Image: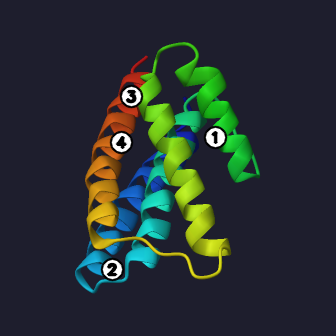
Amino acid sequence: MTEEKKQVIKYRLQRASEELSSAQVLLAAQRNLAAVNRLYYACFYAVTALLETRDLASSKHSGVKALLHQHFIKTSIVENEWGKFYQHLYDARHDVDYTDFAEFSAESAQELYETAQNFVAEVTRLVEKEMIP
């Protein structure tokens, strides 16, 4: 793996961590819709880091989701439950961004935050495993 590729992966994992922190601030301010958006992006950046370990990429969010399922969920590298969570968060982000009068309770947003933290941690662990020669 080239040094440039390692830097891209590191950057994406850093962005995932930053987005989790942003979501935490937004939750504390009771900005649940914005927090859900940031939680999705935290997981998205983590997934794109994982895809990068195998030279996989997509210019579309749906493509990133499809590549995750094809190369990591269906092959049992990533547990199916994480695939379901990513799909749920993908749908939630779409709703809060594009649906008029979308709502997300503080409790639901907090649950998503806790699960997203675990998702990012699990994907980070897999990224590190993938990077070992």
Residue 112, image quadrant:
bottom left
Q: Position of residue 95 (x, y in %)?
A: 60, 66
In the displayed structure, does residue 83 sit left or right of residue 16? right
What's the amino acid at mark 4? Phe
What's the amino acid at mark 2? Leu
What residue sits right under mark 1 in the picture?
65
What residue sits right under mark 2 in the picture?
26
**Label 4 – label 3 distance at C-alpha:** 11 Å
Label placed on residue 30: none
Choose the circle earlier in sequence order: 1 or 4. 1
Residue 27, image quadrant:
bottom left
What residue sits right under mark 4 in the picture?
119
What residue sits right under mark 3 in the picture?
126
Q: Position of residue 49 (x, y in %)?
A: 51, 43
**Label 3 – label 2 distance at C-alpha:** 28 Å
Choose the circle earlier in sequence order: 2 or 1. 2
**Label 1 – label 3 distance at C-alpha:** 16 Å
Query: Outermost residue toward the right?
Result: 59
Query: Outermost residue toward the bottom?
Result: 29
Q: Tag 4's secondary structure?
A: helix
Look at the numbered discs 1 and 3 and tell me whether their residues touch, using CB distance below 8 Å.
Answer: no
Q: Within 10 angstroms of label 1, few (less than 14), some, or many (20 or more) residues?
A: some
**Label 2 – label 1 distance at C-alpha:** 25 Å
- Please tell me whether mark 4 or mark 3 is closer to you in this view: 4
Picture mark count: 4
Is residue 119 visible in this depiction of the protein? yes
Look at the numbered discs 4 and 3 and tell me whether their residues touch, using CB distance below 8 Å.
Answer: no
Q: Nearer the viewer, residue 20 or 126?
A: 20
